[in-house]
Image (cartoon, helix red, strand yellow):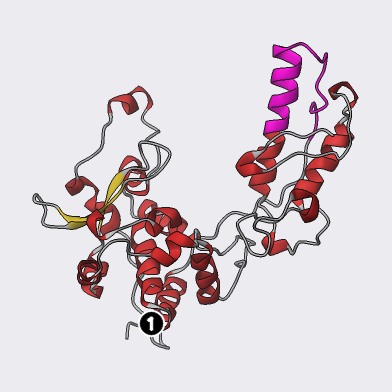
Amino acid sequence: YFGVSGPKGGQFSVGVDMSVHRISKKDLRNALEAIRGLPQRNRKPYQGKPLKDLVKLSIPEEHRISGKTVKEHLKLCQSLFSSYLVKEREILSSSPTEGLTLDYDDRRFAALGDAQVREILEKAKEKPEWVRWFMLLAAYSGARRSELANLATRDFKRCPDTGRYYFVINGGKTKAARRMVPVHPELERAGLIAWVQETDGPLFPTAQANPNRVTDHFASLAGVKVNDVGERVVFHSLRHTFITKARAAGISTVLIQQVVGHEKSGAGITDRYTHSFPLKDVLVVVDAVRYGEPATADGGPI
């Protein structure tokens, strides 16, 4: 049996016990095709099921892992054979990954239109209260699902220099992920701060315990899974929309990167001297994100 651990606990498998010298390009292609058909392991009813059972199932397209994840498995396989077994250990003279390619369904996440976001936020009012605030925070901050799920009352503070509220994201694998995010004026007007102050401890214990509840709620609010150009409409689309709108408003890339938790890049050697900007400098990022006003039948504002 040939197998190696892959991203997020995934695995390559050609289902036979063979020497690495005998593994062919066809074997690897078959393994990657099998991986392409696997489900997202954090979804029910696939949680906890062994891989040998999952490969026997017919997984619906919308439950399968992304094309990006399949591509990560191919990269891992290339690293194992080409970099390790050929170049470093010299166990093989050539790699079976040479010339190995796959066609990926690498559909991008959709950026939503203003009307779509407004509809989602309006429908969220009919959901449990935490869902409404979760969707509002996502739309007006661009924060990731896991980041919002872990927010607590203590994470919300008021800046003494600007008088604006912000929240602190402490988690994340990189330094850039740990940051201060200004609270959008729309969130203040909607009563977010009062709701936070009335809560003691974690704000979203349901999402923290089961992140897929957020995904499921969003799917019911959005109504569609794919937009007209084939891009996926998922909860992460709110983050894409926030970033897209901030960029369209002409905001500096490094300021946007700080607010959404991306590593700063694009300024060459200057990047190493660029530290975190104070809150007053990044207010412009969140304040630039607006979702317009509903229109009347004649196209004018209500």
252 w.r.t. 134: above or below: above
**What residue do we see at 79% from left, 28% from top?**
97
Percent x, y for residue 160? 9, 51
Residue under the point 88% across and 32% down? 17
- Residue at the (40%, 43%) spot, across then down: 172
Task: Locate the C terminus and report the quarter of the image it occupies.
Answer: bottom left
Q: In the displayed structure, does residue 169 sit left or right of residue 74?
A: left
Span shown in magenta: 76-100
Q: Residue at coordinates 84% horizontally, 24% vertically from top-left?
A: 20
Q: Nearer the viewer, residue 144 or 45?
A: 45
In the depicted structure, whether residue 101 falls above or below residue 129: above
Residue 121 belongs to the span the image colors magenta? no
The x, y position of residue 175, in whole percent, is 35, 36
Q: Residue furthest left?
A: 160
Residue 28 in the image, given as x and y percentages of width and height: 82, 35
In this picture, residue 231 sits left or right of residue 282: right
Give the amino acid at mark 1.
Ala
* Vertical relation: 291 (above or below) 106: below
Instruction: Give the total number of marks visible in the rendering.
Output: 1
According to the picture, the residue beneath numbered tag 1 turns out to be 295
